[in-house]
Image (cartoon, rainbow, N blue to C red):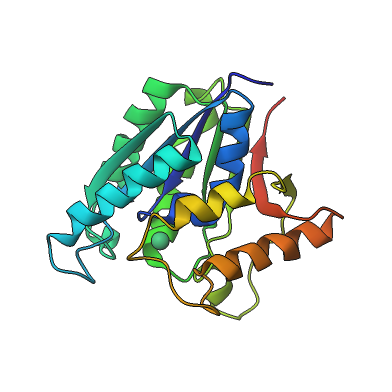
Amino acid sequence: MAGRQVVVIGAHPDDELLGAGATIARHARAGDDVHAVIVADGAGSRYPAEAAATLEKQARRAAEVVGLASLRLLALPDQRLDTVPLIELTQQLEAILDDIGPGVVYTHFPEDVNDDHRIVARCAWVACRPYRRQRLGMFAVFETPSSTEWAWPLPGTPLQPSLFVDVTDTIDVKVAAMECYETELRDYPHPRSSRALRERAAYWGSHIGRPAAEPFLVLRQVV
Ligand SMILES: [Zn+2]
C-alpha cells in the first residue's frame, strides 16, 4: 500500500512526533507522503513571543529527520484554542485535507487532559466526515505522552488501542527527531524524555510480541 497520502494533525509542535513519530517514519520509508499539520504555535502561553520562531525551526528540523513530505503550521493561539470558533479551525483543516486528499488521518485522542488536543480531535473528526473524504480509508487517534495518560481518572473512554504499528525499525528515528525539539524534551522520567519514549514503545510492543510499537485507536476504517 505504498504511495498513500497520510496526514498527521497535532495541536502543538512535537505532538506529531509524540503520538506518531515512529509511524510517520515507517510510512515515509514505505513510500507514503506524510503531511503534518500543527495547529497552535506552541509558544504563546509558556514562552516569550519570539519562542514561536525557535519552535518552528525545531519543527522543521524534526520534519526532515522523520521524513515528512510537508509541514503546515497554522499558528493559532497556544492553550487557547477554545477562543477560536470551532468552525474556523474545522474549515482550515478542511481546506488542507481537500488539497491533500489523504488515505489516512492520525490525530489526538479526544479525551486527553489538554483542551487543545480535544479541540483538534473534534475539528479533525468533523473535517473528515465521510461524504467529504471519499478517499479516506482510516481515521485513527494516537496517545500523546504527558496528556493522554493524565486525563480524568473517571469512568469514560480510556485509549484502548485497536491498532499497533510495529516501529521496531523506526523508534530510533522518532527519538532523534524528538531530540530536535530541545525546548520540549524533558529529563527522565518525564514522559517526554528520550528514555521514556523508548520505554513506552517497548511497553506497547510487548502487547504484541514486538520490540517496539505505537498504539492507535481506529475510529473509522473504510476498505
Ligand atoms: Zn500538545
Image position of 176 with respect to 43: above or below: above
Q: Residue at x 27, y 55 (%)?
A: 55
- Judge from the rendering whether residue 214 lies leftward or rightward of residue 101; answer left or right: right
* Residue 23 x %, y %: 61, 43
* Residue 152 x %, y %: 54, 78
Q: Quadrant of the N terminus?
A: top right
Residue found farthest to the left:
49
Residue found farthest to the right:
209
Q: Is residue 151 visible?
A: no
Q: Quadrant of the C terminus?
A: top right
- Judge from the rendering whether residue 108 lies leftward or rightward of residue 22; answer left or right: left
* Residue 28 x %, y %: 56, 31
* Residue 210 x %, y %: 82, 53
Q: Is residue 100 visible?
A: yes
Of residue 216 and residue 98, the one placed in the foreground of this image is: 216
Count of numbered tags: 0
Q: Quadrant of residue 2?
A: top right
Image position of 1 with respect to 166: above or below: above
Q: Residue at x 64, y 39 (%)?
A: 220
- Judge from the rendering whether residue 71 lies leftward or rightward of residue 174; answer left or right: left
Of residue 151 and residue 56, the one placed in the foreground of this image is: 56
Q: Residue at x 69, y 47 (%)?
A: 167
Image position of 78 with respect to 216: above or below: below
The quadrant of the rendered image in which ligand 1 is seen is bottom left
Q: Residue at x 82, y 60 (%)?
A: 207
Of residue 34 and residue 40, the one placed in the foreground of this image is: 34
- Judge from the rendering whether residue 171 lies leftward or rightward of residue 61; answer left or right: right
